Amino acid sequence: MPKDKTDNFLKAIKKYAKAQKNEMQVEVKQLKTERLKEAEESGKRDSQRRIKEQLHELRSRRTAELAKQTQDGQKKLFIERAGMVDEVFRLAAEKLRAFTLTDAYTAELKKDTQAIAELFGDNDCLLYVRECDLDVAETLKSLFQGDVQLRTDDAITIGGVRGYCKAMAIIADETLDSRLEAQRGWLIENAALSVL
């Protein structure tokens, strides 16, 4: 081959190789840019996912802490409310015990016993009183038409009377103890002592 042709051929090969090299460099550069962009997007997604997870975890932890604080606060309020109610009823029981030392109590006891006697009619019954009310027991028994057996009841701590008629299957409770206890629910509902 003549030298010109060989030179031209070598120049063409070099030119082709250079073009191929440039094309490969552009492709490598483009591939690098694409891979870098994919890595950045993947990093962004991972970062956003991790941030969301941490925020969710933090929010969950704060919610749990707040729920516990709320529960602890409600428990404390409940205990305080129960203590207040107990104190109110302790003071009321003291006043009622003082009332049982008066003539007005004896009159009330007779009135309540009369209501039980009317309810039982001529049926036999048991009549329960405090031991210290036995001094008026005969008067109370005389209010009944049927036979009455008188018993003391240590469960009656404040005062009053309770009757039981087996034939009618009725217990008539006119004790100050049960009347006072019946007011407990009313007090809780109506005294704005609820715990939310």
Image: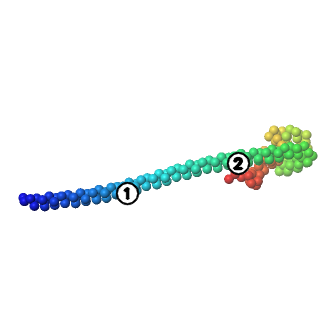
Label 1 crowd bin: few (<14), some (14–19), many (20+), radius 10 Å = few
Pick the quarter of the image with the N terminus.
bottom left
Q: Compute the Cα span from label 1 to label 2.
A: 59 Å
- Label of residue 25 in the image: none
Which numbered disc, 1 or 2, marks the residue that appears first in the sequence? 1
Nearest-to-viewer mark from 1 and 2? 1
Q: Position of residue 135 (x, y in %)?
A: 91, 40
Disc 1 residue type? Lys
Between residue 118 and residue 23, name the one nearer to us: 23
Q: Residue at x 88, y 44 (%)?
A: 98
In the picture provided, is 60 more to the left or to the right than 129? left
Q: Is residue 98 above or below residue 28?
A: above
Between residue 152 and residue 147, name the one nearer to us: 152
Which residue is labeled 1 in the image?
Answer: 37
Q: Position of residue 104 (x, y in %)?
A: 91, 48
Disc 2 residue type? Leu
Which residue is labeled 2 in the image?
Answer: 77
Residue 144 in sight? no
In the picture provided, is 13 more to the left or to the right than 28? left
Q: Position of residue 102 (x, y in %)?
A: 91, 45
Count of numbered labels shown in the rendering: 2
Q: Residue at x 51, y 50 (%)?
A: 54
